[in-house]
Image (cartoon, rainbow, N blue to C red):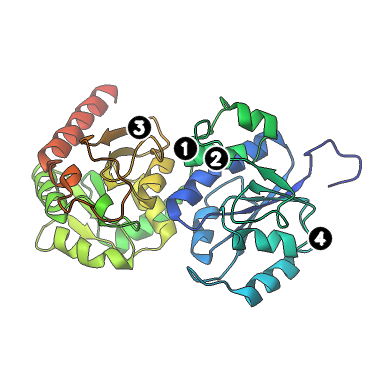
Amino acid sequence: MTEGAAPGAGERILVVGPSWVGDMVMAQSLFSTLEARHPGCRIGVLAPAWSLPILERMAEVDEGVALDVGHGEFGWSTRRRVARSLRGRFDRAIVLPRSWKSALVPFLAGIPRRTGFTGEQRYGLLNDRRRLDKAVLDQTVKRFVALGLPAAEAVAGGFTVPRPHLAVDGGNLAELRRIHELSSRPAIGMMPGAEYGPAKQWPLAHFRTLAESLVAEGFEVRVLGGPKDDEAGKTITEGLAYVHNLCGRTRLADAVDLLADCRQVVTNDSGLMHVAAATGTRVHAIYGSSSPVYTPPLTDSAEIHTLSLECSPCFARTCPLGHTRCLTELSPQRLLAAVLGTERRLAVEE
């Protein structure tokens, strides 16, 4: 910290970021809190390399530091090398993941104050350990923000959670529209993937039926996701005019711009749901095995679609009962009615 500066002023803060797209978007609420509470602070984020393009769209982040360690890999030599590069550069660290290895780099880097929730025997690695009260901190985003607050304030709860907001690159959007030969029709985004598992995935046949109906209503449909979602994208789009399979054909930063350009999106509870919410696009979020209470889209422009069956939310990756009724019985007609109803309200507002 700069000599003579007020507490927090000019402070150099390293945040160890999460490993999921949605969680990284939600982490922006912490970054905003730090910036507001500590004017002049400098925020660095240690995160997987894939997340750097998302961090570049966050005005609060001054530096992204890539930690190229594969999922489930310990990566001791990589963590030591990154730690050496960070020595002397930060005054404190905030560790968002609760694993032992996630706290290792700040410890090896000698960062004086290291904050995180108690977990996985991290007593030696963290020196500002917080107890996680799940009743008070009942959402992932609240847990992130709480680690940036004084302990007493975090325990009391009731603090403000800023909404994520990702910057949009208009020039990149124009180029994407040209490259993918997108039409001038109003666009609806669809995100059929969910990295967690099939119990969070609305049936592809439902997505396709909805896409057909939206095209008949005069819309263009953009199906977005990663390379793993390409086959799903083909199932939804094959043979349909004005329906584009962009899964695996765009970068994560491109998805920010394409989703910001959509009128609305229909999405599983997924990372791209949170990306869409952070661009201000109206979100229709489908919940099966998961709960909107725990990981809601952080926007006022969202409509939650769930059947609230007696067996849900189960938080399982695959349906324990083998029927996934929480998703299969949520009809495409319901989503179509919701999208068209929103369009009617928008027309009145505009």
- Residue tagged by mark 1? 139
Secondary structure beneath label 3: loop
Residue type at numbered disc 1: Gln
**What residue is drawn where x is 42% and y is 59%?**
252
Q: Can residue 240 be seen in this snapshot? A: yes
| Quadrant into which the C terminus falls | top left
**What residue is drawn where x is 30% and y is 67%?**
228
Q: How many marks?
A: 4
Circle nearer the viewer, 1 or 3: 1
Mark 4 or mark 2: whose residue is earlier in sequence? 4
Residue type at numbered disc 2: Arg
C-alpha span from label 3 to label 4: 43 Å
Residue closest to the eye, 71 or 155: 155
C-alpha span from label 1 to label 2: 7 Å
Task: Say if 297 sits above or below 252 in the image.
Answer: above
Is disc 1 in contact with disc 2, using a CB cutoff of under 8 Å? yes
Taking 297 as reference, is 321 left or right? left
Taking 180 as reference, is 297 left or right? right
C-alpha span from label 3 to label 2: 23 Å
Secondary structure beneath label 4: loop
- Residue tagged by mark 2? 143
- Residue tagged by mark 4? 88
Secondary structure beneath label 1: loop
- Residue tagged by mark 3? 301
Circle nearer the viewer, 3 or 4: 4
Is disc 3 in contact with disc 2, using a CB cutoff of under 8 Å? no
Mark 3 or mark 4: whose residue is earlier in sequence? 4
Mark 3 closeness class: few <14, some 14–19, many ≥20 residues within 10 Å: few
Secondary structure beneath label 2: helix
Residue type at numbered disc 3: Ser
C-alpha span from label 4 to label 2: 27 Å
**What residue is drawn where x is 32% and y is 44%?**
290
